[in-house]
Amino acid sequence: MLIAKARETIKKYGMLGRGDRVVVAVSGGPDSVCLLSVLHDLAKDLDLILHVAHLDHRFRGEESAEEARFVEGLAKGLGIAATVESRDVPAYCAERGLSAQAGAREVRYAFLQQCAKATSARCIALGHTANDQAETLLMRLVRGAGISGLSSIPPVRGNIIRPLIAITRDEVLAFLQHERLDFRTDPSNRRPVYTRNRVRQEVLPVLERFNPRIVEALAAEADMLRDENEAIEATLPAVMQQVMRREGEAVHIRRDRFNALLPALRRRVLRKALELAAGDDAVDHSWIRTEEALGFMTAAQSGRSMEVPGGLLLEREYDDLVIRTREQEMVFCVPLAVPGGTMAPAARLAIETVILAPPPFPGADRGNYLWQAVFDYDKMSLPLYLRSRRPGDRFCPAGMGGRSKKLQDFFVDEKVPRVRRNTAPLLATELDVVWIMGMRTDGRFLPGPGTTKLLVVTVRPLEVRGKT
């Protein structure tokens, strides 16, 4: 019965094909011994080539070493090649500040992938059961996971397969007893210090009073949620194309279109946007943090921001919601060589100044554009500086008839994102802002009919080693 059930699961999820090489992870516990026995029974029909893999994590000294010898003997008795190795997982965890469970998982999966590569195996079989599925669902439910988290352990992920995922632990134990198969029990699985053990020993027995088949019910629920999750994920690319766009390192979301989405899609779009903006630094956002961010995104105000995990800043910018990496406020002030060239690593810019006779002169017809400006040299009071914004800065934007304006008001009117205002490079004298580079010059310093000398200022990006 159990073997037939496992065969059905393998067929349902397309886990194995004829002639496949399979690494079987065997810890020596009941689930993995059952898995090995089932696959060994199916190997002839499916023409499978099995390879046993066992890792001693060195947490339990001679006890875990004996388990390694047990697995080695088990494989030998079945005529299956085996890779049995040990790793100093306690040292690995200490070096990286990981819990024993997290560190063991990282090392174990890396070991299994190495075995698969060394043996040219197409897949790695793990002994997770329906009980593992039910326990995981309960653990994540208590933590506040969404549908994707509650779908729990996937039957297939990459080259990992779980042929026993629809089989309960009671069925496993009954099978082992019927087949008279020996196994080993890890005493750490009984310690109540681990959340999974407490769920197994304290929570599930209580739930079984209400439903004797609670494990099957929770495992079925996880399957159903996985189907729902896959359906939502399938719709996301089209939704995101309508709602979201990438501009440089920032992710922009159209507020009106985002707010028109159903709540479930808003959560998915937000999570995808956060992952996209964070890249390799992406973190798992809890339900609480996700709801806080959604509340911020759907509020009516503009010009505010909130920090989110992963080193990100979420801002409302006029018609958009923007997610970008948090930047440190840049404060710089670099004196410029006039004439000459100046490197300003703090602003990631190189500035060149040239003094020329008034037109006609070569290139004079270029005039002013985003990263070059021409001024009346005699109207400037040297020295000149490249600097960042300061409180109270004002200037007279060209084209406004000499009217003075606060830089803060100018940035707001021009819809300059808040995060860029403190990093905008300024050309300034001791007293005045002459040019917001890349944006607008001060009209008081521009050439006129009486100009006798021109100051041409050109700016280009500076490649700074170690910066990206």
Image (spheres, rainbow, N blue to C red):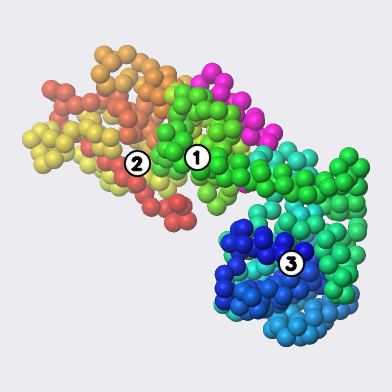
Front position in the image: 49 or 314: 49
Relative depth, front residue between 225 and 388: 225
Q: Is residue 108 left or right of residue 283?
A: right
Is tag 3's residue or tag 2's residue first in the polypeptide sequence? 3
Residue occupying image coordinates x 69% and y 84%: 81
Q: Residues within 10 Å of mark 3 (few under 14, many from 20)?
A: some
Q: Quadrant of residue 158?
A: bottom right
Residue at the image position 77 percent from the left and 45 percent from the top: 217
- Left or right, 178 with respect to 431, comes to right
Region of the chain picked out in magenta, as a range: 283-305
Per the image, the residue denoted by label 1 is 236
Task: From the image, tell me which residue sits under label 3.
Answer: 3
282 up-or-down from 95: above or below: above
Observer able to see residue 98: no
Work out whether 4 lies above or below 356: below
Question: Element type at marker 3?
Answer: helix
